[in-house]
Amino acid sequence: MNQRVEILGANIDRARKEDVLEGIFRMIVAGERGYLCTMNAALLMQMRRDEHLARCVQRARFVVADGQSLVWASRLLQQPLPERVAGIDLIDPIAERAAREGMGVYVLGATAEVCRRMAERLLATYPALRVCGHADGYFAPAEEPARVQAIAASGAQILFVAMGVPRQELFLERNWDALGVAFAMTVGGSFDVLTGRLKRAPILLQKIGLEWAFRLAQEPRRLWKRYLVTNTQFIALTGREFLRSRPWQRSP
């Protein structure tokens, strides 16, 4: 599956949701390991400023276009991605397949209350699923080794990490060898939405690329800089790259 294209300096898998799901479980069954990073405009812009973060993301086994703006940019720059693959839309299919395959999952991130509710939601939705443990994402650096040890000792094959950009990506890369899971995925604020603490944008807003505006309206103080500043930077960067490539002047 891992055919990657370069979009504004970031390598992203050219894949549909079904391809990603199949690739994940093919990897696990084969006894291999890897993590998945969900790419959006905010993460891409941070990667351009932080070489360490960029290396962490590009080492991932899977890198998917979580933001619709990336899909649009890929088409404008003539490196088309087939569709948006949102991390929030992968959680349930992964959990459902894990329940059928007898694989355990671990839930890490968000507040203790939200994390607990996320674990309960998974169990209620997929009774056969083994939820091997859960822990909130608000821990000090000194507490990180204990979190990692607990995950490794749980016996989980799959780990969902919801600690926000870039903390979740750096956590995975830094602790990957010690975590012991076969597969992990960064999911940002998905637990808050799936447990009902926050609402998800209507389908229409998702399709026209305005899910970020819906999120911003719910948490303006926390997200204004991430969305308004980084989105503006992303649009400007895409425009510059489009003009630089000048596709209308290429020889036939």
Image (cartoon, grey):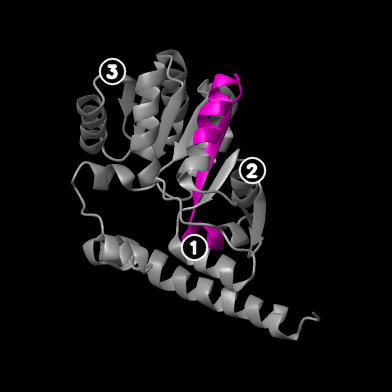
Q: Does the magenta stretch include residue 25?
A: yes
Q: Is mark 2 on a helix, strand or loop?
A: loop
Left or right: 212 as drawn, with respect to 42? left
Q: Mark 2 near mark 1, Cβ–Cβ under 8 Å?
A: no
Left or right: 1 as drawn, with respect to 207? right
Q: Any mark on residue 2, and which?
A: 2
Q: Is mark 1 on a helix, strand or loop?
A: helix
The amino acid sitting under disc 1 is: Ala
Picture residue at 61% right of the left edge, 56% below the top: 50
Percent across and percent down for residue 77 are 63, 71
Picture residue at 35% right of the left edge, 29% below the top: 95
Compare marks 2 and 1 and give the one earlier in the sequence: 2
Q: How far apart are marks 2 and 3 (CA)?
A: 30 Å
- Farthest residue, direction bottom: 249
Q: Which of 97 and 139 is in front in this view?
A: 97
Q: Nearer the viewer, mark 2 or mark 1?
A: 2
Can residue 216 be seen? no
Picture residue at 33% right of the left edge, 21% below the top: 133
Q: What stretch is highlighted in magenta?
A: 22-46
Q: Nearer the viewer, residue 193 or 205?
A: 205
Crowding at dot 2, Cα within 10 Å, few <14 / some 14-19 / many 20+, comes out as some
Q: On the image, numbered disc 3 is attached to which residue?
A: 128
Q: How far apart are marks 2 and 1 (CA)?
A: 21 Å
Q: On the image, numbered disc 1 is attached to which residue?
A: 41
